[in-house]
Structure formats: C-alpha cells, structure tokens
Amino acid sequence: MAVQKLPLAKAINESLRTALDTDPKVLIMGEDVGKLGGVFRVTDGLQKDFGEDRVIDTPLAESGIVGTAIGLALRGYRPVVEIQFDGFVFPAYDQIVTQLAKMHARALGKIKLPVVVRIPYGGGIGAVEHHSESPEALFAHVAGLKVVSPSNSSDAYWMMQQAIQSDDPVIFFEPKRRYWDKGEVDTEAIPGPLHGARTVREGTDLTLVAYGPMVKVCLEVAAAAQEEGKSLEVVDLRSMSPIDFDAVQKSVEKTRRLVVVHEAPVFLGTGAEIAARITERCFYHLEAPVLRVGGYHVPYPPARLEDEYLPGLDRVLDAVDRSLAY
Amino acid sequence: MTVDSTAAARTPRKRTAAKKSAKKSPGAGAPDLVQLLSPEGRRVEDPAHAEYAAFVEDITADELRGLYRDMVLTRRFDAEATSLQRQGELGLWASLLGQEAAQIGSGRATRDDDYVFPTYREHGVAWCRGVDPTNLLGMFRGVNNGGWDPNSNNFHLYTIVIGSQTLHATGYAMGVAKDGADSAVIAYFGDGASSQGDVAESFTFSAVYNAPVVFFCQNNQWAISEPTEKQTRVPLYQRAQGYGFPGVRVDGNDVLACLAVTKWALERARRGEGPTLVEAFTYRMGAHTTSDDPSKYRADEEREAWEAKDPILRLRTYLESETDTDEGYFAELEAESEALGLRVREVVRAMPDPDRMAIFENAYADGHALVDEERAQFAAYQASFTTESDSDSVAGSGGN
Ligand SMILES: Cc1ncc(C[n+]2csc(CCOP(=O)(O)OP(=O)(O)O)c2C)c(N)n1
C-alpha cells in the first residue's frame, strides 16, 4: 500500500528507513538516536534494523557530530545528523557556517557535502529554555546551505528523501509541535521540487505565506476568515533557502495583499526578505504594505508566556484585517 | 589483536567490535576510588586516601547528622517536584535521585565566598548554598528562565546547554585570581557533558591560567540513553592528567568522601595550585527527566544493584550503629521532611503565571528602541480586546 496515514515524525522515520535501505552510504548520527530512537522517536527502530554502524549514537558534542559528518561526507558517505533541539545547534554552528557551508566553493566545486542536519524546531510544546527556538534565518543567511521545513507528513517524507539525495548540505527544520499530526503519505507519488513553494489553499483577497508549524495556523486563519466572507490564499513556502519568490509573486499578483507568518522574530527574519522582494517585484500590484506576523525581539519566553509570543489565530487575523483596511 | 594489512585491505575491518567487550563503564571499581564510608555503612580506612580523609577526621556526630538531614530533605524536595510534574504543576523535572551524596558532600565543602556554577540537576547543591528550593521550580513550571539572583548565594543560574558553564566558571575563577581573593569556584557537569568542546576548552584555560576552579563531574553513568562508554574510553578523572592537573575519582554515593575530596580540591585552588577534576562515581536512579523513559535503554537490574549503594541508607546505618543518634532524631526529621514537601507543593500551586508584558522585560539592560516599539504595539493590541473602539488606532506591523 503506497498511501498511508502517518504522523509527521513517523513519516520522517519511514523516509530515513527508505534511505538507509536503498543507499548503503546513508548514515544516521546523533545523540540518543539509537536504542532510544531519539527523544522524539523519529529514529525509532532504525538502529535495531540497520545496526550500530549505520545508526550511530554519538558522544554528546554537536560540533563533533557535524564536524565528523563532514569528514564522512568527504569519504563518500551521506550522513543525516540529528541535533536534539533547536537551541543546541549552536555548538555546531561554527562547523556548519565556516566548514559545511563553504567547503564546496573552497574546493572549486571538486568536493560535495551531502550532509543533512535535522533540527526539531519551534515552540508550542511547553518546554524549558533552548527547546523552542526558530533559528532558520541564521542558517538561510549563510550561502552554501539549503534550508527547508516541511509542514505535513507527505512533505516530511518526500523532502527528507530529496534532502538526502541533494549533493548540497541541507538544514532540515522539523516542526516539533506537528510531529504528532497525522497526514497522508503516498510513497509512490512523484514529489514536487524540494525548493518549490506550494499553494495549499486558494483564495482571492489576500495571500498568507508560512512554512513549517505556522502553515496549520494559517489554514485555520483562512477558514475563520471565510466565515467573515474573506477569501485567503495560503502558500506553504517549504524552503527558506532558496525561496520560491515566483510562486509568492504569482499569488500576490492575484490577491494584491500579503501577510508573512513565522514563529521566528520578525526583525531581520525570513519575512523581511519576502517583504522586500515582493515589494520590489509587485509594487504596482500591491494594495497594502506587506505585513509580517512573528516573534518579538526578545529571548524566547518561558513556557507560560509562549502563547503570547507565538503567532496565533487572533494575531494573524489582526494582520489580515489591517492589510484589508488599506 | 594483530592486524594483517593485506587481509584488512580485502575485507572491511570490524573496528567497532572491540567496544562490545567494554560492557561496564570505563574504570568501574577502579582501585583509585576514594571511599570513606562503605555501602554497608562502615568507615573505610585506606592509607592511600589519608590525605583526603584528613579533611573529615574531626567531623562530629552533629555534623554527620547535618549531612544526613541535607540528603533526606533534598530527596524529599526532589520527590515532591517529581509528583508535582505528574500532577501537571510543572512542565518538566530533572530528578537528582541517587546523587544526593555527591551534591551534599561537595556543596557542604564550599565556603560562602566560593562561587558555584551548576548545570540543571544540582538541587542538592542549591540547598547547601541556601537557595530556597521553591526558587528552583520556576523554570520547570515555565514561569521564568532562571528564578533567583545568582549573587545572593553565589550560586549561578541553571544552565541547560550542556557544558557551557564550565567556561564561565573558569573565567570567574580567573577573575578571582586576578583579584587576589582566596575563594574558589566549582563547576558541575555530567559524564555526557565531558564530551563537549566547551568542557575541553575549560580544562585548557583553567590549566594555562592556573585558575582556582574545581570541576565536579557527576558521572551518573548515563547521558539520557547513552552510557558513559559512548562518551569516553578512559575513566573520566584520568582526563585531567593530559591537561596538567590532578583528577580524582570519588565514590559519589559516599557523602563523607565527596565532602573530603572536594574540600581537598578547593583548598588546592585557594592555595594557588590551580584546577582539579573530581569525578563523583554515582548513579541516576530515576529517568533523565520526567520526559524520559529509561526502560527503552536500561535494565532494571542495574538500578537495583545501585540501590544497594544508596547514599542515604549507608549514612543512616553509620549514624545508628556508631553514633548516639536516637530514633527521635529520625522521627523529627521525617516530620520536617513532610513539612518541606507540603510547603513546596503549596508554593508551586500558588505560583502565578507572569504578566504577559514580562516578555519584554530584561531583554536588554540599557533598553532598546525596537523592543520599546514592539512592547507598545503589543500593549495596544492587547488593549484592543477590552476596548473595541480603540482597535482602529492599532498601527504598525513590526513585531506582530
Ligand atoms: C548542547 C546540548 N546538547 C544536547 C542537549 C540535550 N540534553 C540535555 S541533558 C542531556 C544529557 C546530559 O547528560 P550528562 O551530561 O551526563 O548529565 P546528566 O543529565 O546525566 O546529569 C542531553 C543530551 C543539551 N541540553 N545541550
């Protein structure tokens, strides 16, 4: 049966399983990925079936994990490494930014670094500090890296396949609060391109652009807005580097209004780039300035305040109203 | 094992096979383990460890009862926090069950003017430093990311990113030395943390600058699901040698030995003799945190074997058999323990959610124009729910 209903985490698990099965060069590495199957169970059962040489529990050292993955890639392997939580990628940030991102260019294109760095990211799970951050802009800003985030099970399955097959390093942000959301996965479908945005709901009055955990929020917003007689289009960006500006432009030329939604701080974030580009491309189509809804320029707050910090239905609807009021 | 290079070239060598033999944690039961109180609750006299034993030679029965009380109350506090998590009052809890002796012994070895850099499980050390235990619960409840003023007890905030604080401790100790003060610094971390680059760098810095810092590694045998042999092939205390300072392994379930060895290391630091690595060989009896399920990776028999080495039990046996501690003492302590549990529960349940404007507090010490702007927008947005007529005046977009 090619079509299955799977939680997002399980879809990634199936995708990793397929990759391990089909390519002996694929390796899984990270803290607790073996017996435990990862703290979110994304790698559950893989070590049991593929052994400790393919699914490797590493020492507790993120710089070590990414640095050795680079070496393994230089030797012809395709490592998929897990960073346990968003806030713990920073010990590896040096390796990712100064080495992983730049080595291909440094070698005049003679070497390839097919490393996937999986990062469960984002808030909404009531966690303690460093377990809820959205640092995607910090990675998208670095040339040489590709940065993607699925919002549903099918994309999780297929984008992981594509990321592993990519000869470039891919930072794969997994929306941890959607890990348990179920969706259909067709393992025989022909997937769209890894970096293509997708319109997940058609509309005519305004475009909402989001990715990862916020796509679901935006679909809820569109449903709520419909009850008030407003027709919103929702575009799932899927990739933050590169960004499919053509798809966003096409939608905005139709709706003439754009609101970008992400959990990460608005200041110098992905939304800022989209706002600037779309303003440039669609200046004469726009009926309102591009608005952004996201986090504030403050440390991610303690769990009991995260609902104030994270964009929710009301805050997005408020931005929609403001845009439509122009 | 000899390696036939031609054969090796033909067939891939199974290099990981060697590890399979290393079932036990490296160096388990090594003779160098400093122990002053056996699991059976008897004093251990080993001439090789006389230098450490000297630090507790004159310990009185009252002081021993004090250590016992600290361990019992810390365990009670920890158990209360665990059940508060189960009841939904805390989002998460990292239990110290089994590590009481390592924490109370080392914590009681510090002086008021020493400075402590904990990780996130040092509830017993916090207790010794006089931090109100209920202050430790705010971050686990999700109402703050810290919860106490580090300078009021010289007990730094909990650090969640593994190993970071060992560098802070080293830098602080470098400052202490620059100031010509005779206090010392102690940094706590786990066996898993020993793999982090920051920890290696803190060893390097502290050795090079002869910083008055004690690295106190609680080797509780596990880093979530990974046993110590996934972090190291040599006993952790032996690492120190490569950096040029002493490393000592102490029985982490023996409060006397932990007290003695830590005092010894702190004294060295005060005398200007530089850093020491203390490895407290102990065991995490519970789950890593309340989110963890050790049955996925750990055999029950292992925990049972360690229960026989329970730090509290062995001191109790000693107090009962070798000192004039009577039943009344234990009964009183039991009552005190219950009272502590009750207080903790009440304080936590009454702990209010922070005001929503708190999001914008303390991002900067000097203030920041962007934060001010976002705060104002947030306030106006919130106000729009109560006074609908004002909603038209909500302007701006950034930060929403
Ligand atoms: C840099 C970093 N990586 C990963 C984590 C997630 N994590 C939290 S605790 C832990 C295990 C720590 O083990 P150890 O250092 O032995 O201390 P213990 O919790 O056993 O006391 C891990 C992997 C983290 N907090 N920080």
Image (spheres, grey):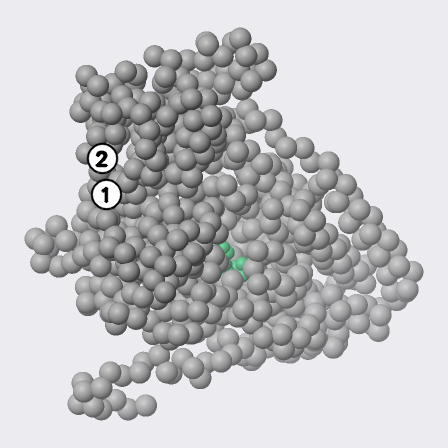
Under tag 1, what secondary structure?
loop
Q: Work out whether disc 1 and disc 2 sit on a shared chain.
A: yes
Q: Sequence order check: which comes first, mark 1 or mark 2?
A: 1
- Determine whether, in the image, residue A76 is placed left or right of residue B115: left
Under tag 2, what secondary structure?
helix
The N terminus of chain A is located in which quarter?
A: bottom left
Amino acid bearing label 1: Gly
Circle 1 crowding by C-alpha within 10 Å: few under 14, some 14–19, many from 20: some
Which percent across, then down, holds residue B274? 47, 56
The C terminus of chain A is located in which quarter?
A: top left
* Chain designation of label 2: A
Which residue is at a point 60% across and 46% down the rendered structure image?
B91
Circle 2 crowding by C-alpha within 10 Å: few under 14, some 14–19, many from 20: some
Which percent across, then down, holds residue A69? 28, 62
Work out whether residue B172 or residue B395 is closer to the camera in this orientation and state it. B395
Q: Is mark 1 within 8 Å of ligand 1?
A: no
Task: Look at mark 1 in the image and give the residue it sits on.
Answer: A196
Which percent across, then down, holds residue B207? 41, 57
Which residue is at a point 79% across and 68% down the rendered structure image?
B316
* Chain designation of label 1: A
Which residue is at a point 53% across and 15% down the rendered structure image?
B384
> Residue A99's mark?
none
A286 is higher (above) or lower (below) than B272: above
B289 is higher (above) or lower (below) than A124: below
Task: Look at mark 2 in the image and give the residue it sits on.
Answer: A247
Are dots 1 and 2 in contact, CB under 8 Å? yes
Amino acid bearing label 2: Ala
A121 is higher (above) or lower (below) than B54: above
**Which quadrant would residue B348 be assigned to in this image?**
top right
Which residue is at a point 7% across and 53% down the rendered structure image?
A108
- Determine whether, in the image, residue A262 is placed left or right of residue B341: left
